[in-house]
Structure formats: C-alpha cells, structure tokens
Image (cartoon, rainbow, N blue to C red):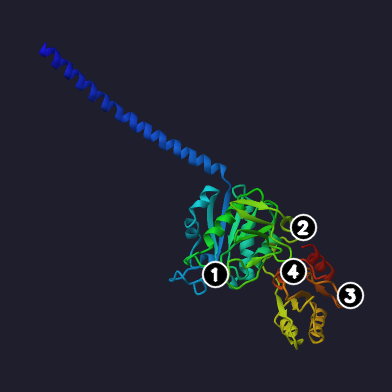
Amino acid sequence: MIKKRMLMIVLGLLLITGCSSSNEPANELKAEAKTETAAAKTKQKQKSLPNVKILATGGTIAGADKSKTSTTNYRAGAVGVDALIEAVPEMQDIANISGEQIANIGSQNMTNETLLKLSKRANELLASDDVDGIVVTHGTDTLEETAYFLNLVIKSDKPIVVVGSMRPSTAIGADGPSNLYNAVKVAASKEAKGKGTLVVLNDRIASARYVTKTNTTTPDTFKSEEMGNIGVIAEDIYIFNEITKKHTKETDFDISKIDKLPQVDIIYGYQSDGRYLFDAAQKAGAKGIVFAGSGNGSISDAAKKGAIAAVEKGMAVVRSSRTKNGVVTPSQELEKKKLLASNSLNPEKSRILLMLALTKTNDPAKIQKYFNEY
C-alpha cells in the first residue's frame, strides 16, 4: 500500500514537471505571435495613414534660448527638423512623417535662391505617389511671401501648408508644437486638397493669397482681415470659404526652368518723397518696382516722375498700398503712363507676383491681367 502511494506521488511529480517544461516553448511562441501581430497592426496602420513630408527652413518655430521666459531674444533656426518631429510624437497618429532640412535661417534672410530651392523640391515631392501632402516650417517675418510664392508655382492639387510660431521652442507656452500638429493634420486631410497653399497658425486656416502678419509679437498675428480665413481647427478641420483667385496648377509659372528671379524692389510712399529712389533702383539693376503708396495707391507728383521715367527705361511699376487692406483701383491717367495696379495684393506679395510675371512677359497689359486674376 505504501509502495503504491509512493509510485502515485512520483508519477504526479513527473507529470507536473513535464507539463511545466512543455508549456515554456508554448508561452514563448504565444509571446512571439503577439509581437508579430502588434507589428503587423502597426504596419497596417502606417500603410493606411497619409504620408506627409516636413520641409524645414528654420525660423522661430525652430528657435531656442537658455531662458524659458524669453520670447523675443532667441536664436532662430537653432533646432533641426528631426527634433521638431520628435517634439510632437502625436503627429505619428495622423500621418507617416518624414523631414528634410532645406535651410535653417530666420525668415528675414530668405532669398530668391532659397525660394527656388524650396519650391522645386516641393514640386518634386508632390509629384511622387509616396507623398500625400507637405508642411513647410518657416519664420513668421516673411512667411506670407514664401507662402504666396508657393501658391503661384506649385503644380499639384495635394495640400501644401506653411506653418510657423511666434514663440521659440524653449519658451513657456510655445505655440510651435500645436501649430505644427495642426499643420500636419491639414496637410494630411482631404479637405485641404485643391485649396492652394495654406497657412496654419493659432488654430486658423488661411489662404496664402489673403493672409498677412499684423502684429510684431503676439500669437494671433496672422489674419486675413479683408477676405477672411478659409477655415478653423477645433480638433476637426472646418473649411467654410473657397478660393476664387487662380493658384498652383492654374497659373502660368513653371519654375522648373527658372534658375534666377528678376530683381524687384519696393519703394515706400510718404510725404515729401521724390524720384531719386526710382532712379537708384534702376541703377541697381531692378527690372520692376512696387510702389507702396498711401491710401488707394496714391503717388505724389514728384514720385510719379520717377515712376514714369522707370517705365520709359523698360521697367514694370506696380502701385500697391501701405494700408495693407482694400483694393488699389486702376487709374485712367496712370494706366496711360503704364503704371499698373496691384488689385488687393499688399506690397510684399505684389513683389512676389511681379518677379514671376517678369519671367513670362514685359507687356504691361499681360502683367496687369496677372494681378487681376492671381
């Protein structure tokens, strides 16, 4: 009886040991299967998400300073595109993100050469099936000029969004991460397709054609005062305005064949101004001049002499307004002298359009048509 009980205990121990050792490989297989399943799900999720490319050019959004309270004294372009992406990991939930550094400068140092480099690269990427949208990070000082340039030369319906920030990445309450997240959300959306180049800051979606910087330092500086924004971001994207001006694929400008843009200068109108600035621009090699006149593009008699002389020397002269709002209307008297009107474009955007127009024509009538349609 005792021997029988001992035999039963030994058999039981053997069974327990055998079961335990046999389960170890099974548990390992289950763990591996779970890992493979998770990886497959992640891969499937990535495959279903749109691909957004971030082209970085520097600016405050990539700025940094030792002090967390500094919002005006910092070094622009101190942070690279990889760090910008890593700082907002939530973007990976809405798109497959990759980045490329085009430049790393304050936007006051943006040049025609960098504009061409950026826009050519953007067109190249948008032509690829592997890219569904582009975000351009940019300093705010000249952001509207770059955005409008892209609005005129990009040859794709895919979304392209320009974004910046008013506070550096190291500041308390930095607006860059939120702006960048929203920009990626817009660039990844179907709603932004065919809308031209968009500008996203402070939860607002604006057309590059209409938006302008209105304040030196505050986060709500970018506004489309006369025409209005085209949408807002309140977790979801809400588009409520359409763009009526021609843009992107509808324009005549093909920059793939352009290696250099003509020099166009801006001359500011003021009391007691004269013609000498027009003469200086012509001597410096300018091919066109934008005159930022008072009111409805008004130009003094003295400055008018300089403008007419510039036209007679083969230059294009466009009247805009220093007021930044409203339409500069044609003048029969000035039209006879071939002084053109900017329509509703402010001086800095008028310069962008005039540069591109001069790559196509010197005919004042055709240039005026561009200003009316674009």
The reply to whether discs 4 and 3 touch (Cβ–Cβ < 8 Å) is no
Give whichever of discs 2 and 4 has the lower sequence position.
2
Mark 4 Cα shell of 10 Å, populated few (<14), some (14-19), many (≥20): many
Kind of residue sitting beneath label 3: Gln
Image position, residue 213 (x, y; %): 64, 69
Quadrant placement of the N terminus: top left
Where, by quadrant of the figure, is residue 38 drawn?
top left
Q: Which residue is mark 4?
A: 345
Q: Which residue is mark 3?
A: 332
Front: mark 4 or 1:
4
Front: mark 3 or 1:
3
Where, by quadrant of the figure, is residue 249 drawn?
bottom right
Q: Is residue 365 left or right of residue 86?
A: right
Where, by quadrant of the figure, is residue 160 drawn?
bottom right
Q: Which residue is mark 2?
A: 244
Q: Is residue 194 left or right of residue 309?
A: left
Give whichever of discs 3 and 1 has the lower sequence position.
1
Secondary element at tag 3: helix
Q: In terms of depth relative to the viewer, which is nearer, 118 or 371?
A: 371
Q: CA distance from mark 4 to mark 1?
A: 26 Å
Q: CA distance from mark 2 to mark 4?
A: 14 Å
Secondary element at tag 4: loop
Kind of residue sitting beneath label 4: Leu
- Give the numbered dot on residue 105: 1
Kind of residue sitting beneath label 2: Thr
The reply to whether discs 3 and 2 touch (Cβ–Cβ < 8 Å) is no
